[in-house]
Image (tube, rainbow, N blue to C red):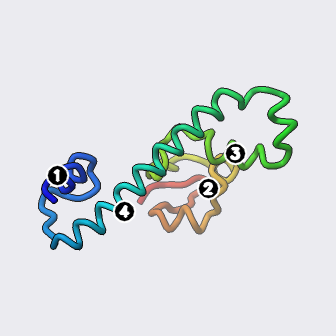
Amino acid sequence: MEKKLKEMVEAGFVGKEYKGSAEEVNKKYKCYLSKKCNDEKFERIKKMFEYVKDDPKFKELMGPDYAKLMESYGKKEKRGQVVRMDFDGMSILDVFKEYKMGVKEVCKKGYTVENDTYKKN
């Protein structure tokens, strides 16, 4: 149990202060292994996609699904990583084109609209 707990803490899955029963630790460890496996699988698929993404034959083969693949695997961040975006000074149209976000969504993140540009509160 100590080994499992140590591995999860080193990976940042649980905090150092986490204390649980043996059963709770085992459940957490199963979740951790599942996440680790999915992250590794995502990285392998991303590497394969990087290799073939510019090939015209691949684009033709995938057809309309190519755009979905680009959306999933063409990102710079890792799987599940939260990316903080700064919209301060950007126009409403630029944010919509680049991030596909409307005014209400951006305003919920703490911005106001002045002269068609976002200002951080």
Q: Are marks 2 and 3 in contact (CB under 8 Å)?
A: no
Which residue is denoted by mark 4 in the rendering? 31
Q: Amino acid at mark 2?
A: Asn
Tell me the mark number nearer the camera, choosing from 2 and 3.
Answer: 3
Give the secondary structure at mark 2.
loop
| Residue appearing at x 48%, y 60% in the figure | 111
Residue at left offset 84%, top offset 48%: 64
Q: Quadrant of residue 18?
A: bottom left
Q: Which mark is residue 69?
A: 3
Q: CA distance from mark 3 to mark 4?
A: 26 Å
Residue 87 image offset from top left, x and y in percent: 52, 50
Type of residue at label 1? Answer: Lys
Q: Nearer the viewer, mark 4 or mark 1?
A: 1
Q: Residue 108 or 29: which is nearer the viewer?
A: 29
**Mark 2 lies on residue:** 115
Look at mark 1 in the image and give the residue it sits on.
3
Residue 88 is situated, as x and y percent measured from the top left of the image, at 49, 49
